[in-house]
Image (cartoon, coloured by chain):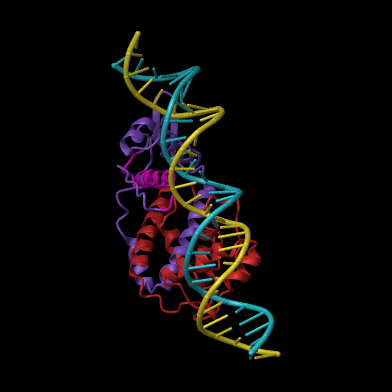
Chain colours: A purple, B red, C cyan, D yellow
Amino acid sequence: MISLNYRDSRPIYEQIKDGLRKLIVTGAIGTDEKLPSVRSLATQLSINPNTIQRAYNELEGEGYIYSVPGKGSFATGDPDADASRREELWEKTRELLAELRYLGVSQEELMALLQEEPSGGAPAGGHKEGTR
Amino acid sequence: MISLNYRDSRPIYEQIKDGLRKLIVTGAIGTDEKLPSVRSLATQLSINPNTIQRAYNELEGEGYIYSVPGKGSFATGDPDADASRREELWEKTRELLAELRYLGVSQEELMALLQEEPSGGAPAGGHKEGTR
DNA sequence: TTAACTGTATTAATAAAATTAACACAGTAT
DNA sequence: ATACTGTGTTAATTTTATTAATACAGTTAA
Protein backbone atom coordinates (compact mmCIF):
# COMPACT_ATOMS: atom_id res chain seq x y z
CA MET A 1 0.00 0.00 0.00
CA ILE A 2 2.76 2.39 0.93
CA SER A 3 6.46 2.01 0.47
CA LEU A 4 9.17 3.73 2.45
CA ASN A 5 12.49 4.80 1.12
CA TYR A 6 15.06 4.96 3.85
CA ARG A 7 17.62 6.50 1.54
CA ASP A 8 15.31 9.42 1.09
CA SER A 9 16.27 12.34 3.25
CA ARG A 10 12.64 13.11 3.87
CA PRO A 11 11.22 12.01 7.21
CA ILE A 12 9.21 8.81 7.28
CA TYR A 13 6.07 10.55 8.46
CA GLU A 14 6.28 12.85 5.45
CA GLN A 15 6.59 9.93 3.09
CA ILE A 16 3.58 8.33 4.69
CA LYS A 17 1.60 11.53 4.44
CA ASP A 18 2.40 11.91 0.77
CA GLY A 19 1.68 8.28 0.05
CA LEU A 20 -1.71 8.32 1.70
CA ARG A 21 -2.63 11.67 0.25
CA LYS A 22 -1.79 10.38 -3.18
CA LEU A 23 -4.02 7.35 -2.68
CA ILE A 24 -6.83 9.62 -1.58
CA VAL A 25 -6.63 12.27 -4.26
CA THR A 26 -6.35 9.68 -7.00
CA GLY A 27 -9.40 7.90 -5.68
CA ALA A 28 -7.55 4.72 -4.82
CA ILE A 29 -9.03 5.25 -1.39
CA GLY A 30 -12.60 6.39 -1.85
CA THR A 31 -14.69 8.76 0.17
CA ASP A 32 -15.33 7.54 3.70
CA GLU A 33 -13.27 4.48 3.02
CA LYS A 34 -11.36 3.20 6.01
CA LEU A 35 -7.62 3.60 6.18
CA PRO A 36 -5.43 1.05 7.86
CA SER A 37 -5.35 1.48 11.60
CA VAL A 38 -2.45 3.24 13.23
CA ARG A 39 -1.15 0.08 14.77
CA SER A 40 -1.63 -2.19 11.81
CA LEU A 41 0.13 0.16 9.44
CA ALA A 42 2.94 0.56 11.93
CA THR A 43 3.34 -3.20 12.11
CA GLN A 44 3.12 -3.54 8.37
CA LEU A 45 5.84 -0.95 7.81
CA SER A 46 7.87 -2.06 10.79
CA ILE A 47 7.94 1.36 12.36
CA ASN A 48 6.68 2.93 15.54
CA PRO A 49 2.95 3.63 15.87
CA ASN A 50 3.72 7.16 17.01
CA THR A 51 5.20 7.92 13.62
CA ILE A 52 2.02 6.79 11.93
CA GLN A 53 -0.06 8.77 14.33
CA ARG A 54 1.87 11.89 13.49
CA ALA A 55 1.18 11.39 9.80
CA TYR A 56 -2.51 10.74 10.40
CA ASN A 57 -2.80 13.66 12.72
CA GLU A 58 -1.33 16.07 10.21
CA LEU A 59 -3.39 14.66 7.37
CA GLU A 60 -6.47 15.26 9.45
CA GLY A 61 -5.32 18.80 10.13
CA GLU A 62 -5.04 19.33 6.39
CA GLY A 63 -8.50 17.94 5.83
CA TYR A 64 -7.64 14.82 3.90
CA ILE A 65 -8.82 12.33 6.48
CA TYR A 66 -11.02 12.33 9.53
CA SER A 67 -10.67 10.10 12.53
CA VAL A 68 -13.27 8.62 14.81
CA PRO A 69 -11.92 7.37 18.12
CA GLY A 70 -12.65 3.71 18.49
CA LYS A 71 -13.66 3.29 14.89
CA GLY A 72 -10.84 4.29 12.67
CA SER A 73 -9.57 6.86 10.19
CA PHE A 74 -11.33 7.56 6.93
CA ALA A 75 -10.75 9.44 3.72
CA THR A 76 -12.46 12.79 3.42
CA GLY A 77 -14.61 13.31 0.39
CA ASP A 78 -15.16 17.02 0.61
CA PRO A 79 -11.88 18.78 1.34
CA ASP A 80 -13.00 22.27 0.38
CA ALA A 81 -12.36 23.59 3.84
CA ASP A 82 -8.73 23.90 2.92
CA ALA A 83 -8.20 26.94 0.74
CA SER A 84 -4.67 27.69 1.83
CA ARG A 85 -3.57 24.27 0.72
CA ARG A 86 -4.91 24.98 -2.72
CA GLU A 87 -3.04 28.27 -2.84
CA GLU A 88 0.11 26.50 -1.84
CA LEU A 89 -0.32 23.84 -4.49
CA TRP A 90 -1.11 26.45 -7.07
CA GLU A 91 2.13 28.25 -6.45
CA LYS A 92 4.07 25.03 -6.31
CA THR A 93 2.67 23.99 -9.66
CA ARG A 94 3.64 27.33 -11.13
CA GLU A 95 7.20 26.81 -9.99
CA LEU A 96 7.29 23.28 -11.32
CA LEU A 97 6.10 24.45 -14.69
CA ALA A 98 8.79 27.11 -14.77
CA GLU A 99 11.43 24.53 -14.06
CA LEU A 100 10.09 22.09 -16.62
CA ARG A 101 10.19 24.82 -19.23
CA TYR A 102 13.73 25.61 -18.20
CA LEU A 103 14.59 21.96 -18.74
CA GLY A 104 13.33 22.18 -22.27
CA VAL A 105 9.81 20.83 -22.00
CA SER A 106 7.63 22.43 -24.63
CA GLN A 107 4.23 23.97 -24.15
CA GLU A 108 2.77 21.17 -26.23
CA GLU A 109 4.16 18.53 -23.94
CA LEU A 110 2.82 20.33 -20.92
CA MET A 111 -0.54 20.58 -22.60
CA ALA A 112 -0.47 16.86 -23.23
CA LEU A 113 0.21 16.22 -19.58
CA LEU A 114 -2.77 18.30 -18.68
CA GLN A 115 -5.00 16.38 -21.06
CA GLU A 116 -3.94 13.05 -19.69
CA GLU A 117 -6.52 10.69 -18.43
CA PRO A 118 -7.19 11.82 -14.89
CA SER A 119 -6.44 8.49 -13.24
CA GLY A 120 -9.98 7.53 -12.48
CA GLY A 121 -9.52 9.70 -9.50
CA ALA A 122 -11.44 12.70 -8.29
CA PRO A 123 -15.08 11.86 -7.91
CA ALA A 124 -16.38 14.25 -10.50
CA GLY A 125 -19.91 13.80 -9.36
CA GLY A 126 -21.37 14.34 -5.97
CA HIS A 127 -20.11 12.54 -2.97
CA LYS A 128 -21.71 10.89 -0.06
CA GLU A 129 -21.99 12.63 3.25
CA GLY A 130 -20.50 10.53 5.96
CA THR A 131 -20.72 10.69 9.70
CA ARG A 132 -19.04 13.96 10.43
CA MET B 1 17.68 37.73 -2.78
CA ILE B 2 16.73 34.72 -0.73
CA SER B 3 14.63 34.58 2.37
CA LEU B 4 14.73 31.93 5.05
CA ASN B 5 11.81 30.73 7.05
CA TYR B 6 12.93 29.32 10.36
CA ARG B 7 9.45 28.13 11.18
CA ASP B 8 9.56 25.94 8.14
CA SER B 9 10.41 22.36 8.97
CA ARG B 10 12.53 22.11 5.88
CA PRO B 11 16.28 22.38 6.37
CA ILE B 12 17.90 25.70 5.60
CA TYR B 13 20.09 24.26 2.88
CA GLU B 14 16.96 22.97 1.12
CA GLN B 15 15.34 26.37 1.27
CA ILE B 16 18.45 27.90 -0.20
CA LYS B 17 18.59 25.29 -2.94
CA ASP B 18 14.97 25.92 -3.89
CA GLY B 19 15.38 29.66 -3.74
CA LEU B 20 18.41 29.71 -5.99
CA ARG B 21 16.97 27.16 -8.37
CA LYS B 22 13.87 29.24 -8.69
CA LEU B 23 15.93 32.32 -9.51
CA ILE B 24 17.79 30.35 -12.14
CA VAL B 25 14.90 28.64 -13.87
CA THR B 26 12.91 31.85 -14.02
CA GLY B 27 15.81 33.66 -15.57
CA ALA B 28 16.28 36.06 -12.69
CA ILE B 29 19.83 34.77 -12.69
CA GLY B 30 20.93 34.46 -16.27
CA THR B 31 23.24 31.99 -17.93
CA ASP B 32 26.81 32.18 -16.64
CA GLU B 33 25.79 34.90 -14.26
CA LYS B 34 27.67 34.88 -11.00
CA LEU B 35 25.95 33.79 -7.83
CA PRO B 36 26.83 35.32 -4.50
CA SER B 37 29.92 33.78 -3.01
CA VAL B 38 29.62 31.14 -0.34
CA ARG B 39 30.92 33.44 2.36
CA SER B 40 29.02 36.54 1.37
CA LEU B 41 25.71 34.74 1.21
CA ALA B 42 26.44 33.12 4.54
CA THR B 43 27.10 36.51 6.06
CA GLN B 44 24.06 38.00 4.42
CA LEU B 45 21.79 35.27 5.75
CA SER B 46 23.60 35.06 9.08
CA ILE B 47 24.27 31.37 8.79
CA ASN B 48 27.29 29.16 8.59
CA PRO B 49 29.22 29.04 5.31
CA ASN B 50 29.15 25.26 5.41
CA THR B 51 25.40 25.32 5.04
CA ILE B 52 25.69 27.45 1.92
CA GLN B 53 28.36 25.21 0.57
CA ARG B 54 26.14 22.21 0.96
CA ALA B 55 23.39 23.90 -1.02
CA TYR B 56 25.80 24.98 -3.76
CA ASN B 57 27.39 21.57 -3.88
CA GLU B 58 24.07 19.81 -4.37
CA LEU B 59 22.87 22.34 -6.92
CA GLU B 60 26.02 21.68 -8.87
CA GLY B 61 25.39 17.96 -8.63
CA GLU B 62 21.95 18.54 -10.12
CA GLY B 63 23.39 20.59 -12.93
CA TYR B 64 21.92 23.96 -12.09
CA ILE B 65 25.16 25.71 -11.30
CA TYR B 66 28.83 25.19 -11.90
CA SER B 67 31.66 26.33 -9.72
CA VAL B 68 35.13 27.49 -10.57
CA PRO B 69 37.57 27.44 -7.65
CA GLY B 70 38.91 30.89 -7.06
CA LYS B 71 36.38 32.54 -9.30
CA GLY B 72 32.91 31.76 -8.10
CA SER B 73 29.72 29.87 -8.79
CA PHE B 74 27.63 30.49 -11.88
CA ALA B 75 24.26 29.58 -13.28
CA THR B 76 24.21 26.84 -15.86
CA GLY B 77 22.60 27.65 -19.16
CA ASP B 78 22.39 24.21 -20.67
CA PRO B 79 20.94 21.82 -18.14
CA ASP B 80 19.90 19.12 -20.60
CA ALA B 81 22.36 16.68 -19.12
CA ASP B 82 19.86 15.97 -16.41
CA ALA B 83 17.14 13.72 -17.72
CA SER B 84 16.30 12.03 -14.46
CA ARG B 85 15.49 15.34 -12.89
CA ARG B 86 13.00 15.99 -15.64
CA GLU B 87 11.38 12.62 -15.11
CA GLU B 88 11.11 13.37 -11.43
CA LEU B 89 9.53 16.75 -12.04
CA TRP B 90 7.18 15.25 -14.57
CA GLU B 91 5.85 12.76 -12.09
CA LYS B 92 5.66 15.37 -9.38
CA THR B 93 3.63 17.61 -11.64
CA ARG B 94 1.28 14.78 -12.43
CA GLU B 95 0.67 14.25 -8.73
CA LEU B 96 0.14 17.94 -8.12
CA LEU B 97 -2.43 18.09 -10.88
CA ALA B 98 -4.26 15.12 -9.40
CA GLU B 99 -4.42 16.84 -6.05
CA LEU B 100 -5.54 20.15 -7.51
CA ARG B 101 -8.34 18.37 -9.33
CA TYR B 102 -9.28 16.66 -6.12
CA LEU B 103 -9.48 20.05 -4.49
CA GLY B 104 -11.95 21.18 -7.08
CA VAL B 105 -9.79 23.03 -9.56
CA SER B 106 -11.32 22.72 -12.98
CA GLN B 107 -9.58 21.77 -16.17
CA GLU B 108 -10.17 25.28 -17.43
CA GLU B 109 -8.37 26.81 -14.50
CA LEU B 110 -5.46 24.45 -14.96
CA MET B 111 -5.36 25.35 -18.61
CA ALA B 112 -5.23 29.00 -17.68
CA LEU B 113 -2.29 28.35 -15.40
CA LEU B 114 -0.48 26.69 -18.25
CA GLN B 115 -1.11 29.64 -20.53
CA GLU B 116 0.21 32.13 -18.07
CA GLU B 117 3.04 34.40 -19.02
CA PRO B 118 6.02 32.14 -18.38
CA SER B 119 8.46 34.90 -17.43
CA GLY B 120 7.08 37.56 -15.18
CA GLY B 121 4.59 35.24 -13.68
CA ALA B 122 1.80 37.76 -13.75
CA PRO B 123 -1.00 36.33 -11.66
CA ALA B 124 -3.53 37.47 -14.25
CA GLY B 125 -6.17 37.76 -11.63
CA GLY B 126 -7.01 35.31 -8.92
CA HIS B 127 -8.23 31.85 -9.72
CA LYS B 128 -11.17 32.28 -7.48
CA GLU B 129 -13.10 29.13 -6.89
CA GLY B 130 -16.53 29.00 -8.30
CA THR B 131 -19.63 27.23 -7.20
CA ARG B 132 -19.06 24.74 -4.47
C1' DT C 1 54.05 40.34 -4.76
C1' DT C 2 50.84 41.20 -1.41
C1' DA C 3 46.16 41.30 0.06
C1' DA C 4 41.64 40.06 -0.44
C1' DC C 5 38.87 37.52 -2.56
C1' DT C 6 37.09 32.68 -4.47
C1' DG C 7 35.66 27.38 -3.96
C1' DT C 8 36.79 23.23 -1.53
C1' DA C 9 37.86 20.10 2.24
C1' DT C 10 38.17 18.14 6.94
C1' DT C 11 37.14 17.12 11.70
C1' DA C 12 34.69 17.98 15.79
C1' DA C 13 31.15 19.87 18.66
C1' DT C 14 26.51 21.44 19.18
C1' DA C 15 21.64 21.95 18.15
C1' DA C 16 17.50 20.41 16.31
C1' DA C 17 14.44 17.06 14.61
C1' DA C 18 12.78 12.52 13.94
C1' DT C 19 11.94 8.08 15.76
C1' DT C 20 11.35 4.77 19.12
C1' DA C 21 9.78 3.01 23.56
C1' DA C 22 6.51 2.08 27.03
C1' DC C 23 2.69 3.10 28.62
C1' DA C 24 -2.24 4.80 29.76
C1' DC C 25 -7.18 6.08 28.79
C1' DA C 26 -11.60 5.83 26.49
C1' DG C 27 -14.70 4.61 22.70
C1' DT C 28 -16.40 0.69 19.45
C1' DA C 29 -17.60 -3.81 17.89
C1' DT C 30 -18.39 -8.75 18.25
C1' DA D 1 -15.25 -9.67 28.13
C1' DT D 2 -12.05 -9.27 24.63
C1' DA D 3 -9.88 -7.17 21.07
C1' DC D 4 -9.90 -3.83 18.40
C1' DT D 5 -9.87 1.59 17.50
C1' DG D 6 -7.81 6.64 18.07
C1' DT D 7 -5.49 9.61 21.29
C1' DG D 8 -2.22 11.31 24.69
C1' DT D 9 2.05 11.58 27.50
C1' DT D 10 6.84 11.40 28.94
C1' DA D 11 11.41 10.00 28.18
C1' DA D 12 15.24 7.94 25.81
C1' DT D 13 17.48 7.24 21.61
C1' DT D 14 18.88 7.92 16.97
C1' DT D 15 19.47 10.62 13.05
C1' DT D 16 20.14 14.83 10.74
C1' DA D 17 21.22 19.59 10.33
C1' DT D 18 24.00 23.28 11.68
C1' DT D 19 27.79 25.48 13.51
C1' DA D 20 32.69 26.04 14.52
C1' DA D 21 37.40 26.40 13.49
C1' DT D 22 40.63 25.71 10.36
C1' DA D 23 43.40 24.76 6.21
C1' DC D 24 44.67 24.66 1.22
C1' DA D 25 44.86 26.33 -3.46
C1' DG D 26 43.33 29.17 -7.35
C1' DT D 27 41.93 34.12 -8.87
C1' DT D 28 42.03 39.02 -9.04
C1' DA D 29 43.45 43.60 -8.62
C1' DA D 30 46.39 46.97 -6.47
Q: Nearer the viewer, residue B99 or A18?
A: A18
Q: Is residue B58 above or below residue A10?
A: below
Q: Is residue B18 above or below residue D30?
A: above
Q: Residue at x 29, y 49 (%)?
A: A120
Residue A74: name its quadrant: top left
- Is residue A29 toward the left or the right of residue D10 in the image? left
Image coordinates of residue A4 in percent, x first then y, are 34, 46
Image coordinates of residue A34 in percent, x first then y, are 35, 33
Image coordinates of residue C4 in percent, x first then y, are 67, 79
Q: Is residue A12 magenta?
A: yes
Q: Residue at x 41, y 45 (%)?
A: A12
Q: Main secondary structure of the magenta part?
A: helix
Q: Residue at x 37, y 34 (%)?
A: A32
Q: Residue at x 61, y 70 (%)?
A: B39
Where, quadrant-wise, is the N terminus of chain A in this rendering?
top left
Q: Is residue B122 above or below residue B74?
A: above
Residue A41: name its quadrant: top left
Image coordinates of residue A43 in percent, x first then y, are 33, 33
- Is residue B41 toward the left or the right of residue A83 in the image? right
What are the residue bounds of the magenta stretch?
A9-30
Q: Is residue A68 above or below residue A45?
A: above
Q: Nearer the viewer, residue A122 or B77?
A: B77
Residue B115 visible? The answer is: no
